[in-house]
Image (cartoon, rainbow, N blue to C red):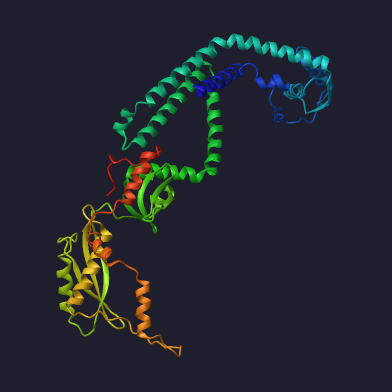
Amino acid sequence: MKQLLLTIVWLLCFLSEVHIAQAQDLSKLLTGNETNGSAPAPDKVITVTHLKQNDKKIEKRLQEIFSELDNLKNIKVSVSNGVVTLEGEIVSKAAETRAIQFAQQIESVVEVESRLIFDQSITKRFPETINKILTFGKQLIAGLPLILMALLIFLIFWTLGGWLSQRRSLFRRISVNNFIAELLGKITHFVFILTGIVLALNLLDSVALLSTILGAAGIFGLAVGFAIRDTVENFIASTLLSIRNPFEINDFIDIEGKQGNVARLTSRATILISPDGNHIRIPNSTVYKATITNFTRNPERRFQFDIGVGTTDDLSRAQAVALAMLKTIPGILKEPKPLAIIHELGDSNVVMRIFGWVNQTQHDFLKVRSEAIKSVKQVFDESLITMPNPIYDLRMTHDQEPSPEKNQQSVKKALKINLQNIDNQAEEVHDMTIDRTVENQISKENIEDKGENLLDPNTPSEL
């Protein structure tokens, strides 16, 4: 309501100034300027011969013109060989400009020389200012009905545009999400306001002023655009991201090395929560231009790990043992099938790379991978498949070595673990349920924080 009242006051002042500007510009009342700046003298051809009678005619004609104008009555004119000299007292610079313009318009005038003196006497300037203010008041009262009608038209379009912009259901039918619907509503409101201004100016017969206003607004907007280029770029990127919808809330994504679950998409940035629980804020302009890896969009995700096999072992048997164990682990899909390949020859072993697929909607990806590594290592031990360690050349610099008994005592003191507690944790170790710690944190934040979120689950996702 306060904003509307301020707008009405501003528009009332603006329309009144526009209407009266047709007869007399408001700034002239305060500065005493009655005309714009002096126009350049028209191009004239100076004749070789000049008659003295012409000087008398020029002088007489100018004196007749000046005698009809209050601010120019005290000017004396003298002409010699087409050069006009103006002398006397004037009350403003505008009066001097007008006198020079009149003189330049007379035929056969070659040049105009001004020797006019400005009269700063308050006894002359104050009554003139009062008369101008009274004239302004009369013109304002005369034009008040038109001004009020123009203001009424503007208010009608303002109200109608505001009412229409609140019809979210209407815009939601033609837009892809709520953010675009809200943006269309604001654009519609702006169009109605602009239409109201055009009609109001048309009623006051001042439509030509609109181009001047729009031109000034365009220059101002260009300057502001350069100043807030990053903000505008982020806003445009957020609009495009909300339309394309490359990710949704809780999706685990990677944006140029920054990984986390999506918390929200604002008009400036994309908020991620890392697996450590930290908030990562990435500008939308960076997100839109970046390579985005979405690990959640496809429910099936493949893991891999490497394991070393002795160079003397049967590699085919080792592959078969690993695959047989992978097929028994809960959470590893049978289709696509797990895979075990010989990756490369190491310094002291043969590197086998193992692949397996997990349905992320049913099992926790990291837990299944962890169980696969542990199970393959265990079955290799039971199958007598060696997993050689790297060979190092150690040189002992101490003369005395600790005794085996002392080493065992140190180990017992360091490992103060209750074996009963370890047995109780066995069930938790084999638990493959999805860890939803970060997802629960995001849900809690979205409930507590009512800020903007441009991600809409009803929007079609980008494939």
Q: Is residue 15 visible?
A: yes
Query: What percent of the width, then of the height, locates residue 394?
Result: 40, 87
Query: What percent of the width, then of the height, locates residue 108?
Result: 76, 25
Q: Is residue 66 visible?
A: no
The image shows residue 413, relative to residue 102, as above or below, that is: below
The answer to which quarter of the image holds residue 268 is: top left
Along the viewing direction, whichever of 288 and 148 lies nearer the viewer:
288
Instruction: Report the side of 43 relative to 4 (left or right).
Output: right
The image shows residue 246, relative to residue 171, as above or below, that is: below
| Total residue callouts | 0
The answer to which quarter of the image holds residue 25 is: top right
Query: What percent of the width, then of the height, locates residue 126?
Result: 78, 15
Q: Residue at x 36, y 46 (%)?
A: 263
Q: Residue at x 16, y 69 (%)?
A: 325
The answer to which quarter of the image holds residue 73 is: top right
Instruction: Report the side of 87 relative to 312 (left or right).
Output: right
Q: Residue at x 68, y 11 (%)?
A: 135
Q: Residue at x 34, y 79 (%)?
A: 408
Query: What percent of the width, then of the height, locates residue 276?
Result: 38, 56
The image shows residue 412, relative to residue 327, as above or below, that is: below
